[in-house]
Amino acid sequence: MTEPSVRDIAYTFISEGIAKADLAVFDAVLSEEIVVETGLHPQGPILGREAYKQIFAAFADAWPVQRFEIHTVVAEGNRVAIQFTATTVFEKDYYGVAATRQIVPLREIHLLTVAGGRIVHNTVAGVNFPFEYIMYPVLKDLVLGPLETIA
C-alpha cells in the first residue's frame, strides 16, 4: 500500500473535511499543531487542530454547504493550492449577526502545506464579498482593530 500524496491529503481535507464538515477528516489529515490563517478567526492565526475544529464547526453549523465545487488543484513540492466555491445558506446566528437565510457563495483558495503526511499550515484567501458585507457590523472592528490615524 502506498502513502497518500501531498495532493491527495490536501484534496481529501477540502473535499471531505471542509465540503462536508467532517471533523473526523480533520483528525485524520491535520497536524495537532496546525497553523491556520483565516477570516474565521480575525484576531490572528488559529493555533492547533482542536481550536480549528471548534471554530470551523461553529461556522459550518451556521453556514451549511448546499453545493461544493472544486475548480483548481495545483501541487508543487509540499504545497497544494485548491480553489473552490462553497454555496452556503446563512441558517443560524453567527458572531452575533442574526441569520438571514440568504444563499451565499464563498469563493476561496486554500494554500496547504504538508509535512510528515499531515497538513501543518493552511492560508485561506477568499473573494467572499456577500459574506463580508453580511458580517461587517461585527467583524469590522475585529479585522481592522484600532488603526492609527494621521493628526
Image (cartoon, rainbow, N blue to C red):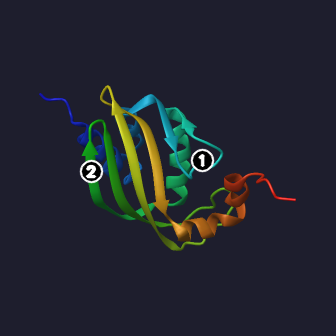
Query: For the point 27% across and 53% down, which residue is it?
Result: 73
Specify the farthest residue to the top. Answer: 116
Q: Is residue 18 above or below residue 33?
A: below
Residue 12: give x, y in percent of width and height.
29, 44
Residue 147: give x, y in percent of width and height.
76, 54
Q: Secondary structure at mark 1?
A: loop
Depth-wise, is mark 2 or mark 1 nearer the camera? 2
Specify the farthest residue to the right. Answer: 151
Query: For the point 28% across and 39% down, which residue is it?
Result: 9
User: Which residue is the site of mark 1?
Assistant: 41
Q: Nearer the viewer, residue 149 or 31?
A: 149
Residue 120: quadrant of the picture: top left
Query: For the point 54% across and 41% down, which residue is it?
Result: 54
| Mark before the other along the chain sequence, 2 or 1 | 1
At label 2, the amino acid type is Val
| Left or right position of 33 against 3 | right
User: Which residue is the site of mark 2?
Assistant: 74
